[in-house]
Amino acid sequence: MQTPGPENSPARPALLVALVVLALIVTTIYARESDRGPLHTTRSAVQSMVRPVETAGTWLTTPIRATSAWMSSLGVSRAEVAELRAQNGELRRRNAELEEARQENERLRGLVRLVEAQKLASLGARVIGRPENSWEGVITVDRGSADGVKVGMPVMGADGLLGQTVTVAKHSAKVRLITDQRSGVASMLQSSRAEGIVRGSINGQLTMDFVSKTATVTPGEVVLTSGMGGVFPKGLVVGEVLDVSAPANALYPLIKVRPTAKLQGIEEVLILTGPTSAPDVGSTE
Amino acid sequence: MRRGLYTAGAILLAVLLQVGLAPALSLGGVVPNFLLLVTVTLALVEGPNWGATAGFSAGLLFDLLGSGPIGPMALVLAVVGYVAGMLSANMFAEGWLLPLSVLAIASVVTGMAYGLLITVFVGTGSFWQGFVSVVLPEALYNVALGLLLYPVLARFLRRDRPMNTFRRLA
């Protein structure tokens, strides 16, 4: 049986053509305007508007992530179940809260140590949003232009480089992860000092391109930022070489890189705002 | 007027789901596209003109929420909404297979077209790598969600006729 079709107006191809042309105009304007142009400003405004929804979504879905983490740790904690049964519910709840605080403290200490070692000024931020579509490896953090964040600032995790800020709203910013297909980091190999570009890909794999064929590259070698181009400070840990191969007709070796920083489930990050203003330690006379 | 309000409400709902819920539903980096789902549903319910307009609006919001160029998804969803809308007169036959087939095809076409545009505009990425690792898994994910959400959305949008069962509705 077929129900009657809806009484829709006849198709108007002119409308479709107009919308396609409009979309192309919008794309062209976006490509040509500056970071303060109307479309960039509109994007910042829209992202500011949806920030509470992102924050609420992240908060509301915390139990899902916590349950997932708990289930993955069942194998380890099962042996302790008998002992834990002796404890009452209130103690367990408090223990969980303290454990959460301890882990957070540990992560933050790691971040601070890392940045102090690099002598870089930084700003701590919480992750309030994760990738919203399959095409982008972009997270949202709760710091924005009101906190001094600008487009292009490097972002670190406790274990290494995470990415850089790409759009900044007043109280939030989008961070493009190094695994994103549009990401490229000027890098070098720690021991051979051979330079190249670490690129992300659509499936989240990292490769190091443009490394000379004459360079000796071994799996496990550490990959650092080279400082070339001035976007990322020199010496930040990007990852380690996972695999090296030399395709017959390729100009450069194919180097796969494993990121050092944990890119899944990040909760806190540090935005590097610039070099620290070093105190003058020279002679006073 | 009321039709426009329902359309705007559906797109707003899709934005909220895309921002608030979709990141938590990520499976291996693949995130469902609620804006596409709503565009296809609107097109099937309201026809090509509304489908194209809704697709353009939803796509523009998708672009604004992301960090890439603004415009490509608006272009793609406008076309997808229009073409899907052309099928609207034949869509409310009994059965659920036809709407979900349209959704699956729309997902694949949207992914391919968007991937192609991104490759052209931004100049990075491998089209085929994206097809295998993003387009196909996302299409499957969208269809799975469509199975759950399409009947609800269509009921919400098509209030001018009673729809009591999933079978009748789809």
Image (spheres, coloured by chain):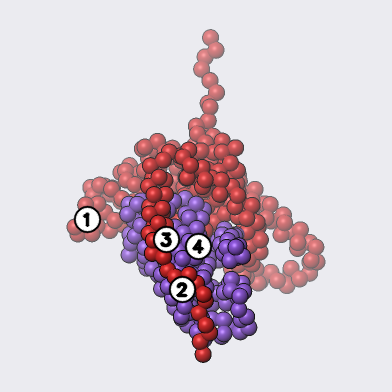
Chain colours: A red, B purple
Q: Which residue is mark 2?
A: B103
Relative to residue A126, is residue A12 depicted above or below?
below
Callout 3 environment at 10 Å: few (<14), some (14 to 19), or many (20+)? some
Measure the C-alpha gap from mark 3 to mark 2.
22 Å
Q: Is residue B124 left or right of residue B152?
A: left
The percent position of residue B79, horizontal first and vertical second, equals 40, 64
Corner quadrant of residue A245: bottom left
The secondary element bearing badge 4 is classed as helix
Viewed as shown, does residue B129 lie left or right of B50? Answer: left
**Which residue position holds label 1?**
A250
Nearer the camera: disc 3 or disc 4:
3
Nearer the camera: disc 1 or disc 2: 2
Q: Nearer the viewer, residue A60 or A1?
A: A1
C-alpha gap between disc 3 and disc 4: 12 Å
Viewer-proximal residue, B138 or A42?
A42
Q: Residue at x 23, y 49 (%)?
A: A213
Nearest to viewer (mark 4 / mark 2): 4
Tell me the distance, in whole angstroms, between the alpha carbons under discs 1 and 3: 48 Å
Q: Earlier in the sequence, mark 1 or mark 3?
A: 3
Q: Amino acid at mark 1?
A: Ala
- Which quadrant would residue A146 be assigned to in this image? top right
Disc 4: host chain: B
Callout 2: chain: B
- The kind of residue on which mark 3 rests is Leu
- Residue at the spot 69% in from the left edge and 56% down from the top edge: A99
Percent from the top left, x then y, of residue B125?
A: 35, 56
Is tag 4's residue or tag 2's residue first in the polypeptide sequence? 4
Question: Label 1 vs label 2: CA separation?
Answer: 41 Å
Q: Please, what is the three-letter code of the amino acid marked with disc 2?
A: Leu
Amino acid residing under circle 4? Ala
Residue annotated with mark 4? B54
* Coordinates of residue B146 in the picture (x, y in percent): 52, 74
